Image (cartoon, helix red, strand yellow):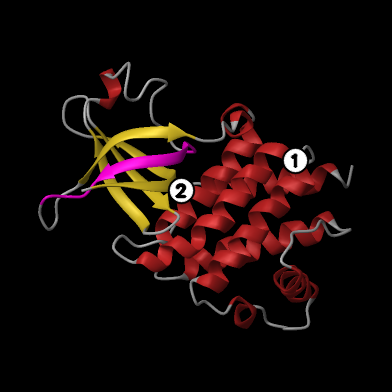
Amino acid sequence: MEIQHPGIVLRRSEGRGSDLILKILTKDSGKIAVVARGARNSKKRFSGGLDVFDNGVFSIIEARSAGGLAVLSQIERGEIWLNLREQLLCFTLSSLALETADIFAREGDSHGSDLFKPLYLCLKNLNQVESDSKRYVCLIFFLVQLLRISGYDLLSEVSDENSIEARWFREMLERKVAFVPESKELIRDGLILLVETVQGIDGWELRTGEEVLSRLQKFTASSQQ
């Protein structure tokens, strides 16, 4: 049976021959692993290639047997987020968003679909906003939502629940919107706390975490010169 799934490509790897293996976060069914047959050589079905950040409606044929992979037959492409690929900071931050979504959305668990809208809006906004402060805050707001949706009590990780970081996180969740605080140091401290919290869960280590934090330190230092 072929089903249409609105989704976002989280991860891509090479399969046999010219096949590609994709992890797709879908709007209705959570994370799905699919194989795109002959995708690396395809000039019709997958013209333009398949890669992370690709979004749209994916036509997926269900796996024939337990443990098998579903098959991607075609994609109706959605928005093209050029800045996520062409601007280094946007690419780095959005890559961390994809990586954390891939970790928290487990295959076979439809609750992973709860992450679809926050991730979609995070990537869309990262592609659109022009200031670095807003870009970092887009990622921070996504991570705060991800932890809340996934059942982790972020505020319990904050030593003082009335600290400025905790109050900022809580206010964004209550208002359901990201906003830039006055202090770059708060952006720095908030993102460091979030990355450390994610990495502290089951010993996960974020491949993109070190690069994000390195850029974050430079971002904060630039305001002190």
Q: Residues within 10 Å of mark 2 (few under 14, many from 20)?
A: few
Alpha carbon of mark 2 to alpha carbon of mark 1: how far?
A: 25 Å
Quick one: which residue is furthest to the left in this view? 65
Identity, as a three-letter code, of the amino acid under mark 1:
Val
94 lies above or below 165: above
Indicate which disc, 2 or 1, sits on the residue closer to the N terminus: 1
Q: Give the camera-side residue of 96 and 53.
A: 53
| Horizontal side, residue 208 vs residue 9: left or right | right
197 lies above or below 69: below
Q: Residues within 10 Å of mark 1 (few under 14, many from 20)?
A: some
Q: Give the camera-side residue of 145 and 206.
A: 145
* Residue 196 in view: yes
Q: Residue at x 44, y 37 (%)?
A: 52
Q: Quadrant of residue 158?
A: bottom right
Q: Name the residue under label 1.
A: 129
Which residues make up the magenta segment? 53-64
Residue 141 drawn at (x, y percent):
67, 60
Q: Mark 2 points at which residue?
A: 207
Tag 2's secondary structure? Answer: loop
